[in-house]
Amino acid sequence: MSEFSLIYTHFQHATAKHKNTILGIGDDCAISRIPPDCELVSCVDTLVAGRHFVFETSPHAIGYKSVAVNLSDLASMGATPYAILLGLSLPNHDNDWLKEFSRGIADICHQFNVELIGGDTTKSDILTISITALGFVKKGQAIRRDNAKIGDVICVSGRIGTASLALSYILGENGRCKHSNSINELSNHLKTALQYPTPQVALGQLLLDYANSMIDISDGLGQDLGHILKASGVGAKLYLENIPCIDELNDLPLDKKYQHIINGGDDYQLCFTMSQENFDKFTALYPNRIYPIGEIVANQGVDFFYQNQQVDFKIQGWEHF
């Protein structure tokens, strides 16, 4: 099958046409219409087999997650997703694999009203997926990393550390699932957290009028919060017992529990800061949607506290090299 036949068969009609697309797949470039009161928000993420997902991961899950991680980046700025472009490097042409992979992409694109508008395919020794995501946000309203204020409440959007725990089970670090082909032995909620993360798009949009700074948690809560702190020139106090997590993490020794929560990554929840006043307003309107875990302070760095006692903890998130 030629490259063009592959694109036509598996991708050209995978998603519905978006109202802002003038020209999609089928030409040298796509053409899009940007709403007059909006700015374009764009990001790109690359996933490599054996590096970002175990080889036994289903093609549907690979397709789904490759889009989800990019939509999570858009969510972190409060943007509304619009479209994606796909760069796909394949070791071989496997029609069944491609069918399931494209179905995974289509499923999440339909969920968030996103169109696949273009991309490229090529042959490679290692399966590599690169997604560029585009979204829109009202002019001047995007939530950035560099605006955290002293006194802000630090919040997260959901339970942290679940995907890290799931991966540790697959890799045999907790006495279970000692082979990577045991991914199907995971409980449903662990498998879902690792393979089918939910980008917090709706919450990101709700936070546009409330949050001062925001980031998505991909490389570990500690490391990603650190990006906010560095960009804003501030520090933080984190209260470890306030960080929401699943019951399985509570069964672990504290050092292992918080290794997953602070350094594990792959959560794709949001971490953000807002004034106490805005926190009170938001939680009154949307109870049980966000979780306060700390506060922004003047002294740079992160101080960790557990049950009112300061504790030492080393931040060491995901390293790409």
Image: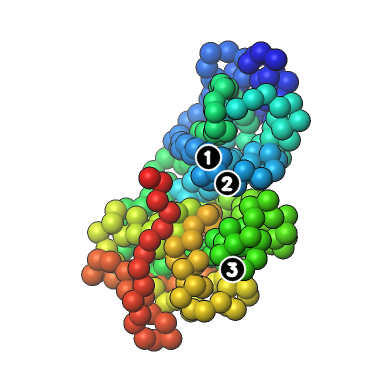
Q: Nearer the viewer, mark 2 or mark 3?
A: 3
Label 3 belongs to which residue?
174
- Could you say which quadrant of the image residue 276 lies in? bottom left
The residue sitting at 52% across, 39% down in the picture is 48
Residue 50, image x, y percentages? 55, 43
Mark earlier in primary sequence (3, 1): 1
Q: Amino acid at mark 2?
A: Phe
| Residue furthest to the bottom | 308
- Is 257 or 206 nearer to us in this picture? 257
Q: SS of the residue at dot 1?
A: strand
Residue 219, image x, y percentages? 45, 54
Q: CA distance from mark 2 to mark 1?
A: 8 Å
The residue sitting at 44% across, 62% down in the picture is 263
Label 3 environment density (alpha carbons within 10 Å; few <14, some 14–19, many ≥20): few
The disc placed on residue 47 is 1
Quadrant (top left/top right/bottom left/bottom right) for the C terminus: top left
Label 2 belongs to which residue?
53
Mark earlier in primary sequence (2, 1): 1
Q: Decide if residue 55 is in sight here.
A: yes
- Could you say which quadrant of the image residue 222 lies in? bottom left
The residue sitting at 62% across, 68% down in the picture is 175
Cβ–Cβ under 8 Å for marks 2 and 1: yes
Q: Amino acid at mark 1?
A: Leu
